[in-house]
Amino acid sequence: MKCRVCKQTAAVALPSHHTAFCPACFAAYFARQVERAVHNHRLFTPEERILVAVSGGKDSLALIHQLAGQGYNVTALHLDLGIPNSSGPAREIVAAFCAAHGFTLRVVDPAEMGLSVPEVKAAVKRPICSVCGKIKRHYMNKIAYEEGYDALATGHNLDDEVARLFANTLRWDRDFLGTQGPLLPAQGKFARKVKPLCRLSEFETAAYCFLHDLRHGATACPYSKGASFTGHKKLWEDLEQRSPGSKTAFYEHFLTHGKTAFAPLAHKDREPLQDCRICGAPSNLETCGVCRIREQVFAVKEKAGADLCGQGREAKNSL
Ligand code: SF4
Ligand SMILES: [Zn+2]
Ligand SMILES: [Zn+2]
């Protein structure tokens, strides 16, 4: 197979674009897709400071590498969620990557603040991925807002966005359908959120990392099995195989036609937000969702401690 641009031997085939590229032309294509997302959706400007959430996976590493390559002012943010066999290696990968490329790295440890994912999972009777997502969003926003970054960038790619849009559409969730997209403008204590990889697929970010020799984490989170977004991605992969370009069409047409219909309805019935009495984050109740989760974790720990003391007393009395 030949590269569409220079006719050298192609290294990356992209059926959804009916094309293939050699490594150099693929790098140019990748950069162009990011430039288009930044420009078309007015995500940020070269003068602005961007906080990039870096998990250690291929998408976030490709994102910060590409943005820095385009001359943007980036700082990496890593959250350590205390997930066994996953968080430790991820943190090491991010630290080594940032050191090798000269990126400033900010690490936040929700686990040290009583919010390790295994403890949260034991205490909260809801699907762990939705709770974990809430904790991640809370801390990413907190750092971006409190430390005055102009935008918080995440490595969500086209597949992530399509899976999320699909889930939102299945529920006809007008709040999310009215706000989903590559740009969520800043509002109150919410920092601007941007997704510059929204035009690139998971395969393309993997190819980018491979061709640039970026070592990324390969250990999947042990809790990811059975998550609904994994199933939705499989469905879309199947559709894309049968009909290349479906994902891009679904997402881009939503942004141009669908979103505008839902935007006036989004969060229409939401109570005005207030500052959380504990941490000051914007919240629709007196205490924000993350502080409530932390309280649940502490309550479970206290009960376990009390049960242990009780057992100790009983054992002593029976001697
Ligand atoms: S798979 Fe779920 S639990 Fe694991 S890091 Fe992702 S959101 Fe969190
Ligand atoms: Zn080429
Ligand atoms: Zn709070």
Image (cartoon, helix red, strand yellow):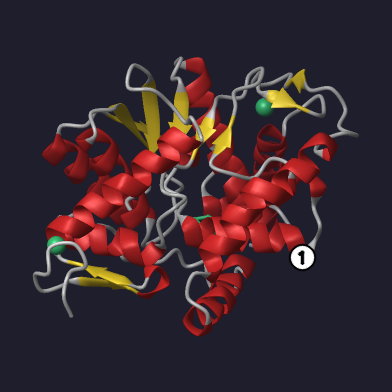
Q: Residues within 10 Å of mark 1 (few under 14, many from 20)?
A: few
Q: Quadrant of residue 35?
A: top left
Residue 273: x %, y % from top left = 79, 23
Q: Is residue 208 above or below residue 272?
A: below
Residue 317, percent across and down?
69, 56
Front in this rendered view, residue 289 or 35: 35
Q: Position of residue 200 (x, y in %)?
A: 40, 56
Q: Who's the residue at 53% across and 33% down the image?
A: 193
Marks counted in the figure total 1
User: Within the displayed image, which quadrant is ligand 2 positioned in?
Assistant: bottom left
From the top left corner, tell me how far across and down residue 130 is, in percent.
65, 53
The reply to whether the residue tagged 1 has its Cβ within 8 angstroms of ligand 1 is: no
- Seen from this angle, which residue lies furthest right? 269
Left or right: where does residue 206 sit relative to residue 3? Answer: right
Above or below: residue 287 compared with residue 7: above
Residue 316 seen: no
Residue 80, can we see it? yes
Q: Quadrant of the C terminus?
A: bottom right
Q: Give, as a three-letter code, the residue at label 1.
A: Leu
Seen from the viewer's position, the closer of residues 183 and 223 is 183
Residue at 61 percent across and 24 percent down: it is: 190
Say whether residue 253 is left or right of residue 20. right
Please report the residue visible at 15 percent of the width from the left and 65 percent of the height from the top.
22
Q: Which residue is mark 1?
A: 170
Residue at position x 13%, y 56% from top?
Answer: 24
